[in-house]
Amino acid sequence: MNIKARVAEIAKNAKKAATALARLSSDAKDRALLDMAEALTRQTGLLMRENAKDLEKATQMGLSAAMIDRLVLNESTIEGIAKGLKEVAGLPDPVGKVTSMWRRPNGLLVGRMRIPLGVIGIIYESRPNVTADAAALCLKSGNAVILRGGSEAINSNIAIAKILQSVLTKRAIPEEAIQVIPMTEREAVREMLQLEEYIDVIIPRGGEDLIRAVVNESKIPVIKHYKGVCHIFVDVGADFDMAVNICMNAKTQRPGVCNAMETLLVHQDIAGKFLPLAASHLKGAGVVLRGCDRTRRILKDIEQAKEEDWYQEYLDLVLSVRVVDDLDAAVAHIEKYGSLHTESIVTNNYQNAQRFLNEVNSSTVLVNASTRFSDGFELGLGAEIGISTTKLHAFGPMGLEELTTTKFIIYGNGQVRT
């Protein structure tokens, strides 16, 4: 069977499976998820062996340290994946939830009920944990999922999917509810993106080039974010120790992820004292600083920031720094250079905090906390399926509710329209 026919078969089978999934009880879905968590833990050795094949290939391919970091499966990450599945099992099931009801003058009782989207296609790079996370969220929300990971993680992804499918089979749930496209050729992605008859939505996860390619080729609606140019604004009167701790966490804990800080904005009235303190900690952690002219008058040994730096998602230990006049200037900078992903303000001024929350229109906005909290698991959604910076139909980290839509339900007692 050629690639086109094989991908079409996978999509058709997913469509059939989605019908069965939409009818599953919450208990049946939760039991399957708990079994999947146990099965993954039991198979830790197998998963690490398959992952080792991918890591060896990734090294030979010369992938970046950030990409390899996302690719690694070890005992800790596998335990984290299993924990994520258990968390999803413990979350309320959105399917069948009636979100509102109202009565019309003619006596009709009108409401909205949550239903699955249907078949979800996920296209992603590295991150084999996405295979399990996405499968869990789709199963709990009643959706079938087609997973197409990068060639660098093919062995890991197939191994995870087989473990999950074995649980589905034991639970008498169609195994086609969770499928991995086993071909690494790009043609498989192109064919997948044409199957609007069978696939309801595409969610790409990866670098900006991948996501733009998916958007350009897809006939299917795409939920996406291109990049995470995340900002922290340290306001006048901010607690310096708090600000330094937040900035260090946001930049250095995992610099290769989309919710890491890429630009630091500092109020001019505190820049002279705060910047040397922050720079000492950041440079001590290996961060390369690139500053505006005002910043470099204070930190004379750092690199000059160019215009393109303010748009840059480094995904590395590199940070752009700008001194700004005030809150208005910080908001204006974010509006011009931001990517609608995640922004934070460090402040002791309640009014400024509220203005920042109201005026910054990114998908996640924080006060006195690290940008690294822009994550479905950290926000209580369970494992996330991705972060959307497109306001339709979801905005920000996507959990279970974002994988459903609503239909109208209407109760009558014989009404007809006149």
Image (tube, helix red, strand yellow):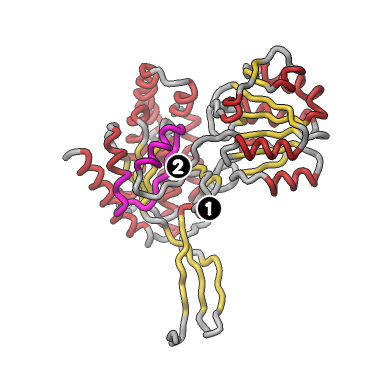
Residue 69: x %, y % from top left: 48, 25
Residue 401: x %, y % from top left: 51, 55
- In this rendering, the answer to whether 243 lies above or below 116 is above
Residue at disc 1, secondary structure: loop
How crowded pointer 1 is (Cα within 10 Å; few <14, some 14-19, many 20+) is rated as some
Can you tell which quarter of the image residue 292 is in?
Answer: top right
Residue positioned 82% across, 29% down in the render: 269
Quadrant containing the C terminus is bottom left
Answer with left or right where residue 133 lies relative to residue 338. left
Of tags 2 and 1, which is closer to the observer? 2
The boundaries of the magenta stretch are 193-217
Answer with left or right where residue 101 lies relative to residue 45. right
Q: Would residue 170 be visible to someone looking at this image?
A: no
Can you tell which quarter of the image residue 122 is in?
Answer: top left
Numbered circle sitting on residue 91: 1
Mark-to-mark CA distance, 2 and 1 = 14 Å
Residue 391: x %, y % from top left: 53, 50
Q: Which residue is mark 2?
A: 133
For the residue pair 109 and 168, the one nearer the viewer reads as 109
Answer with left or right where residue 170 lies relative to residue 102. left
